[in-house]
Image: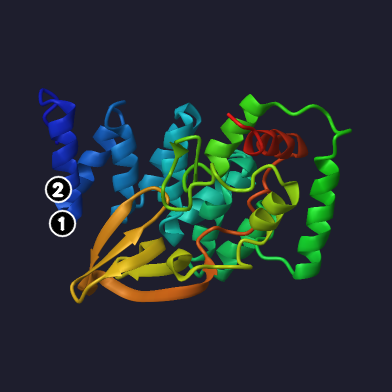
Amino acid sequence: VANTQENIAARRAALTALLNVRDARLQPLLPLLLKETELRRDAIRASASFNDPQTPDRLLALYPSLPAVEKREALTTLASRAVFAKSLVAAMTAGKIAAGDLPADIASQIRALGDDELTAQLTQVWGVARVSSAEKLAAAARYKSVLAPSAPLPDAKQGREVFMRTCGACHKLFDEGGSIGPDITGSNRRDVDYLLHNILDPNSEIPNTYRMATVTLRDGRVLAGFANTQDPQVVVVTTPSEIVRVGRDEIASLVQSDVSMMPEGLLTPLTDSEVRDLFRYLRSGK
């Protein structure tokens, strides 16, 4: 991993092998790998596996210069441990990171850490996640007004960028995006009511395969995702950013939730203009 004369594929394979066995010798290499463009994304993701108190400062310093996909990796890593997430929420409170940068699924990951004070701070700077049925109906009515034909003309190209930031980690649309959730290309996307119902109330109908599991490791890391593959020795946790194989002896607790992996509050951090752009792209045919 440390040999810069090796080809990138070999170094990446070595990093993955070391990470899979949580080799402690990898941790001091990560700050160096964060400086290498070709391995930086891997290093950001790997940083979640080690409880290094310097990790939040390193990632927050890098954040403004990162491309969008690496910004998401940084946010995911910062949401993986309570001590990391406190630095992230503090940066959001101070205006160093825009609240709108934080997707709803990563906000949900921070809430899964189970720190009441941290959750309260997140709610103050980001917004409320779960709301009542009456509030959902009111939100649907408001967004229908935002999306009315008389509203300013939306931009599908900008909507595609909002989709990739907000939905694309889990869902494919036009063969682009993640595979953790259903491919929505063939869904009833033309229908605004259908879209609003599924986005604003994702917990109304939840197949068992899409129920979220919260896996807390003995070293303090929390993984939120699907834990549909388990055996007596290993649990495979599928998150929006990676697939993590965890030994049973590493797990402090595994809680299967009654809520969907798709979080509520997806539209909360978006401006009305971004909502219009997103829906224009979601309803498009290409």
Which mark is on residue 220? none
Tell me the kind of residue under disc 2.
Answer: Ala
Near mark 1 (Cα within 10 A), the count class, few <14, some 14-19 or many ≥20, is few
Q: Residue 29 lies in what quarter of the image?
A: top left
Q: Residue at x 79, y 55 (%)?
A: 140
Which mark is on residue 21? 1
Tell me the kind of residue under disc 1.
Answer: Val
Relative to residue 145, is residue 32 drawn left or right?
Answer: left
- Give the quarter of the figure containing the C terminus: top right
- For the residue pair 207 and 105, the one nearer the viewer reads as 207
Q: Residue 276 lies in what quarter of the image?
A: top right
Report helix, strand or loop for mark 2.
Answer: helix
Location of residue 218 in the rendering, given as x and y in whole percent from the top left corner: 29, 70
- Give the quarter of the figure containing the N terminus: top left
Q: Residue at x 15, y 49 (%)?
A: 18
Q: Residue furthest top?
A: 5
- For the residue pair 212 and 156, the one nearer the viewer reads as 156
> Which residue is identified by label 2?
17
Q: Residue furthest right?
A: 150
Location of residue 241 in the rendering, given as x and y in whole percent from the top left corner: 39, 47
Say how many tags the image has: 2
| Badge 2 vs badge 1, beta-carbon distance below 8 Å | yes
CA gap between label 2 and label 1 equals: 7 Å
